[in-house]
Amino acid sequence: MHQEQKRDFDAAAANWDQEPRRVKLAQDVVAAIRRELPLHGRMEVLDYGCGSGLVTLGLQPFIGKITGADSSRGMLDVLAGKARERGVGNVATALLDLEHQQLDGSYDLITSSMTMHHVKDVPALIASFVPALKEGGWLALADLEAEDGRFHDDPTGVLHHGFAREFLVEEFSRNGLSDVRVVIAAAMEKPGANGEVRTYPVLLWLGRK
């Protein structure tokens, strides 16, 4: 069952990074992006649905400037605090919800990790990203491969139980992106209610404008 009620990410922000699986997933997504895309020091990047900035700060050393955007002020405050502690000057934050706002700016890379399953209209989200990409810019979206609904311990705010590979490939192509491909970014292992450990692939969809 899909949960229309939104999760309170502001309340979860302070302790978000204390889950080791979450930190490892972000590291794996960053590694996959670095492996698949030609990152360089002049790139302007948007990380949408950045949360506490695990992916944002993972990409930060390899690009020119990155903006972490999220609809949770609490998450953005955590990201800003971590950036200050590390003394990095190329990280900005933006309070942004593309279900109710338009995306401004122009980017060499727009990325988003584990955000799409919280978004009701994913094709509309993808369509909102593409005009903000520079010519030759990349879209890189990571999320669960379609699963049976057992991944999330708390289903609040979960609107999709992952995505079929072909569904997002078709949406990327429909929006005019080229070099569209899908790779496995991570494999998350989680115990079920009966103690059985299950593996959930996290995919990275890539396309170039």
Image: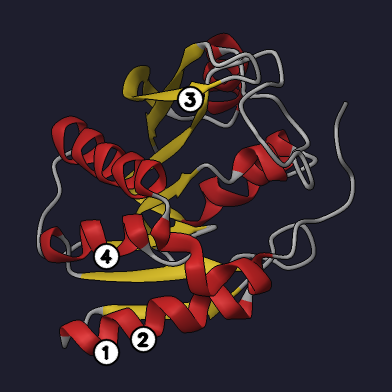
Mark drawn on residue 103? none
Query: Which quadrant of the structure image shows residue 3?
Result: top right
Residue 138 in the image, given as x and y percentages of width and height: 34, 42
**One can see residue 10 in this view:** yes
Q: Amino acid at mark 2?
A: Gly
Mark closest to the chain's N terminus, 4 or 1: 4
Q: Are marks 2 and 3 in contact (CB under 8 Å)?
A: no
Label 1 residue SS: helix
Dot 3: few (<14), some (14–19), or many (≥20) neighbours within 10 Å?
A: some
Q: Are marks 4 and 1 in contact (CB under 8 Å)?
A: no
Residue corresponding to mark 3: 190
Label 2 residue SS: helix
Q: Are marks 1 and 3 in contact (CB under 8 Å)?
A: no
Mark closest to the chain's N terminus, 3 or 4: 4
**Residue drawn 79% across the image and 64% down it:** 100
Q: CA distance from mark 4 to mark 1?
A: 11 Å
Mark closest to the chain's N terminus, 4 or 2: 4
Mark drawn on residue 84? 1
Label 4 residue SS: helix
Residue corresponding to mark 2: 81
